Amino acid sequence: MQVFESVAALADRVGEELGTTEWMAVTQDMIDAFADVTGDRQWIHIDVARARTESPFGTTVAHGFLTLSLVPMLMQQIFRIEKVAQSINYGSDRIRFPAPVPAGARIRGRHRLKAADPLPDGGFRLVHHMTVEVENGDKPGCVAEVISVIYPAAD
């Protein structure tokens, strides 16, 4: 975990990889809960018996958007900015799901700071390049540019 005193200190690291997280399991319980919340109950995610016999992966797989939704939690394990008044999720660009994340697989996040642009209102627009790696996988489960807007705390 890297700790930055300010947004400006983080901005000095544009272009650099800030680190990776520990491995974490994506369980069938997580996949089922995501299906319940989103209403995406496609069998490839929730029907273990059918996925074992009919899926090309031999098991159920996490929803791509479940994998993407884990990115903020993963980022929090890589770095923290002190002296922040407010942090806003501004959105994501260039999202891809190159490989499935099988139920029970372990993933980790890899972060590179792509941009840190000052805004006229005193905030910063940060672009984070996040890769969600699948343990022993040839391709990542998710690659995305995640955008946040950070407002520094008053000194």
Image: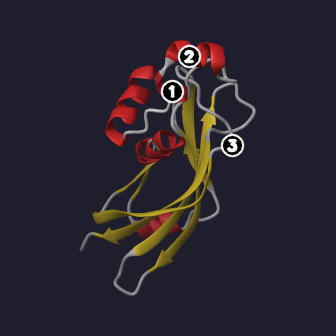
For the residue marked with disc 1, what is the amino acid?
A: Trp
**Where does the image place residue 153, in percent across and percent down from the top left?**
26, 69
**Which three-letter amino acid code belongs to the residue tagged 2?**
Arg
Q: Position of residue 53 (x, y in %)?
A: 64, 13
Is 35 left, or right, of 133 in this rendering?
left
Query: Is residue 97 in sight in this rendering?
Result: yes
In the picture provided, is 3 more to the left or to the right than 144?
A: left
Whether residues under marks 3 and 1 lie with C-beta atoms below 8 angstroms apart, the answer is no
Residue at image point 34% right, 64% down? 88
What is the secondary structure assignment of the residue under circle 1? Answer: helix
Rendered position, 131 above or below 137: below
First in sequence: mark 2 vs mark 1:
1
Q: Do the CB atoms of the residues marked 2 and 1 lie less than 8 Å apart? A: yes
Q: Is residue 13 left or right of residue 88?
A: right
Number of numbered markers: 3
**Residue 73, relative to residue 116: is it above or below?**
above
**Within 10 angstroms of label 2, few (less than 14), some, or many (20 or more) residues?**
some
* Separation (CA) of disc 2 from disc 3: 23 Å
Q: Earlier in the sequence, mark 3 or mark 1?
A: 1
Q: Which residue is mark 3?
A: 98
Displayed quadrant of residue 60 = top right
Q: Is residue 46 left or right of residue 131?
A: left
Mark 2 = which residue? 50
Crowd tier of the residue under label 3, counting other residues whose Cα lies within 10 Å: few below 14, some 14–19, many 20 or above = few
- Camera-side residue: 79 or 89? 89
Mark 2 lies on a secondary structure that is helix
Quadrant of the drawing holding the C terminus: bottom left
Percent x, y of residue 105: 57, 23
